Image (spheres, rainbow, N blue to C red):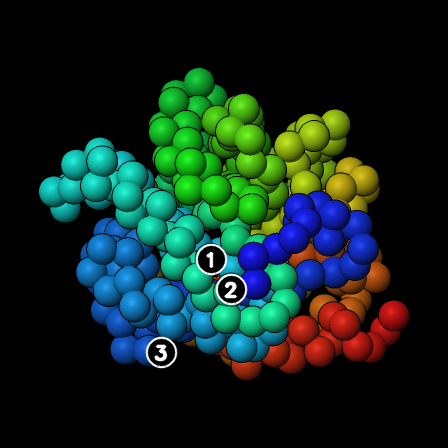
Amino acid sequence: MRPARPLAEALAEGPVVLDGGLSNQLADQGADLSGELWSARLLADAPEQVAAAHAAYVRAGARVLITASYQATFEGFARRGASRAEAAALFARSVRLARAAGEGTADEVWVAASAGPYGAMLADGSEYRGRYGLTVRELTRFHRPRIEALAAASPDVLALETVPDTDEAEALLAAARGSGVPVWLSYTAAGGRTRAGQPLADAFALAEGDAQVVAVGVNCCTPQDAEAAVPLAAATGKPVVVYPNSGERWDARAGGYRGPAAFDPSRAAAWRDAGARLAGGCCRVGPGAIAALAAALHGGGA
């Protein structure tokens, strides 16, 4: 059901389960994710697939649904012929689809409107490097229109996610300021640093004292890197958000994933005890893993 309280209030009471990877669930449903827009293309071409993926995570126990807008930009939609008004309508549809899926349960379900990094628009993997050669001001100008479009659709929170460096974090926070919607700030990280190489403790510190930030943490990284980041994020005094990948490695040359999966849902209790209040999964973490994570988060290790 539509939540009766802000997400920040729920986080103050205890941990909340995030969903898992949207793209892998869409692929499992048979959806075609080819093209630069990735899953965002389905907002126009197959919204019923997005709705079904959200519903699968609700059934698994997710109580925060992240919209299919990670790779959605005005620029990307324009390349496929959509006008500004049509693109704005697709941003709004991403929020409506998640909201409708949440109304299928008696529990509160919050909608997090995804605002991915500039590199996601480039569709060249640069969100895992950052440092695009743009200033903070230029990045802010890029992010503000789509954040405004997402905020106009009344999500419960903006997910500023997969952020590779502190410059882009500053830009996203600036673009969201004044939107009237709280945010979480989530970096993609490796070895205790952002993908651009800044110490995570310094990156997380950007959220300290920022009233719009209801959680800070990491996503789209290995489970091991995610777990190590939780206490660093908790040092800010903010609730921690953590949703790692499966741990498999993407081989761009071969066009597939390699290596074993390392996502262990039972570790969610340890994340919670270290300060995590929003926990879920990212790429290749599906509904089955989220159901197991929900059981661990609310069951063992209290």
The residue that mark 1 highlights is: 99
In the drawing, what numbered circle is on residue 132?
none
Residue, disc 2: 102
Q: Is residue 190 visible?
A: no
Of 243 and 226, the residue lying toward us: 243
Mark closer to the observer (2, 3): 2
The quarter of the rendered structure image containing the C terminus is bottom right
Taking the spot 48% from the left edge, 42% from the top edge, the residue there is 154
Question: Where is residue 1 shown, x and y percent of the image?
Answer: 56, 63
Looking at marks 1 and 3 on the same chain, the residue that comes earlier in the sequence is marked by: 3
The amino acid on which the numbered mark 2 sits, given as a three-letter code, is Gly
Vertically, is 129 above or below 142?
below
* C-alpha span from label 1 to label 3: 22 Å
Mark 3: amino acid: Asp
Q: Secondary structure at mark 3?
A: helix
Which residue carries the number 3 mark?
28
Question: Total number of numbered labels?
Answer: 3
Which residue does the image show at 59% across and 39% down from the upper left? 183
Q: Position of residue 25 (x, y in %)?
A: 40, 72
Q: Check the image and report above or below for 229 versus 118.
A: below
- Closest to the camera, between mark 1 and mark 3, is 1
